[in-house]
Image: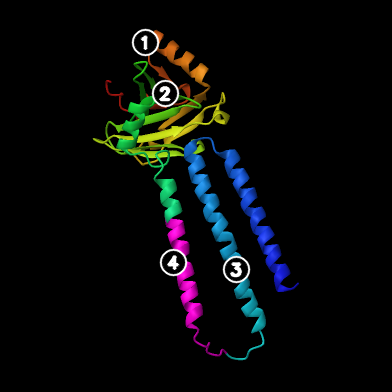
């Protein structure tokens, strides 16, 4: 196989791998947060695969060409070549940095207080206050003025802003399936902003974990996250508002009220 044919094969293989990986990532994105992260990963992958193939190809060529050499010979200095790979490396690093910053600076990935407040002021997001305490979660829905314990219900196709609080020690909201994660820090309000895609709607709940070790009951600090259609979510909010009672997830509320857990602070 000559060099040109080998190059063509490498280009086709690279394009196939990138497109296949991108399709799988796009299909699995359940939030705009995941979409931003997946797009960045696909972009970096598109750069990394050809670079890897080129470097490994040159290495393989050198091993094969000099396989019969009895001893190493010093290379001839080539300033043009050295300058070329130095500039190329710098360009690649700048590209990666700019691409990463563009994704990480998105409010759906890194939500600041300013961006969250702007969203609340200028849009009509669903706002939920998420309180972590040893060792359970209390969700307060300001729009309906009711609470749930160890159960978070969110709508699809609508901007969601979670305001994160801790009533005692550091906790962390982590919903791996929805690509959501951020710390709950005592005396500080953190924010998560995202839009859940309609393909995330299902009857089975997603799991919310505490991602910071917070004591003896840390492993039991779980919550169920239900994603509903906008109409079903509105109906659920109206039911909770009219009942005036807190609701709890059956799977974790028992653990939270055990001897490990402290009573939930008053709202």
Q: Earlier in the sequence, mark 4 or mark 1?
A: 4
Q: Is residue 4 left or right of residue 244?
A: right
Identify which residue is drawn at 48% across, 32% down. 207
Q: Earlier in the sequence, mark 3 or mark 2?
A: 3
Snapshot quadrant of residue 180? top left
Query: Which residue position holds label 2?
Result: 253
> Where is residue 57 shown, x and y percent of the image?
63, 71
> Where is residue 140 shown, x and y percent of the image?
35, 22
Query: Which residue position holds label 4?
Result: 90
Q: Secondary structure at mark 3?
A: helix
Q: Earlier in the sequence, mark 2 or mark 1?
A: 1
Q: Earlier in the sequence, mark 4 or mark 3?
A: 3
Query: Which residue position holds label 3?
Result: 54
Look at the image and give the residue range highlighted in magenta: 72-97
Q: Is residue 121 left or right of residue 43?
A: left
Query: Which residue position holds label 1?
Result: 244
């Amino acid at each position: 196989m000559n060099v040109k044919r080998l190059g063509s094969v490498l280009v086709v293989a690279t394009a196939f791998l990138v497109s296949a990986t991108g399709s799988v990532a796009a299909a699995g994105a359940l939030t705009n947060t995941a979409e931003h992260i997946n797009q960045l990963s696909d972009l970096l992958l598109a750069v990394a695969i050809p670079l890897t193939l080129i470097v490994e190809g040159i290495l393989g060529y050198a091993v094969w060409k000099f396989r019969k050499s009895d001893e190493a010979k010093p290379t001839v200095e080539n300033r043009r070549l050295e300058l070329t790979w130095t500039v190329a490396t710098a360009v690649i690093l700048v590209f990666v940095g700019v691409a990463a910053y563009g994704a990480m600076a998105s409010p759906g990935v890194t939500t600041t207080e300013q961006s969250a407040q702007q969203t609340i002021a200028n849009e009509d997001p669903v706002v939920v206050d998420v309180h972590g305490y040893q060792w359970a979660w209390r969700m307060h829905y300001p729009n309906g003025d009711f609470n749930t314990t160890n159960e978070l219900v969110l709508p699809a196709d609508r901007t969601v802003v979670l305001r994160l609080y801790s009533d005692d020690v550091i906790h962390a909201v982590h919903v791996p399936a929805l690509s959501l994660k951020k710390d709950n820090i005592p005396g500080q309000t953190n924010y998560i902003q995202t839009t859940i895609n309609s393909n995330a709607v299902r009857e089975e709940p997603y799991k919310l974990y505490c991602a910071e070790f917070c004591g003896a009951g840390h492993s039991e600090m779980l919550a169920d996250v239900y994603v509903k259609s906008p109409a079903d979510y509105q109906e659920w909010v109206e039911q909770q508002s009219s009942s005036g009672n807190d609701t709890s997830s059956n799977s974790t509320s028992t653990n939270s009220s055990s001897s490990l857990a402290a009573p939930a602070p008053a709202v």
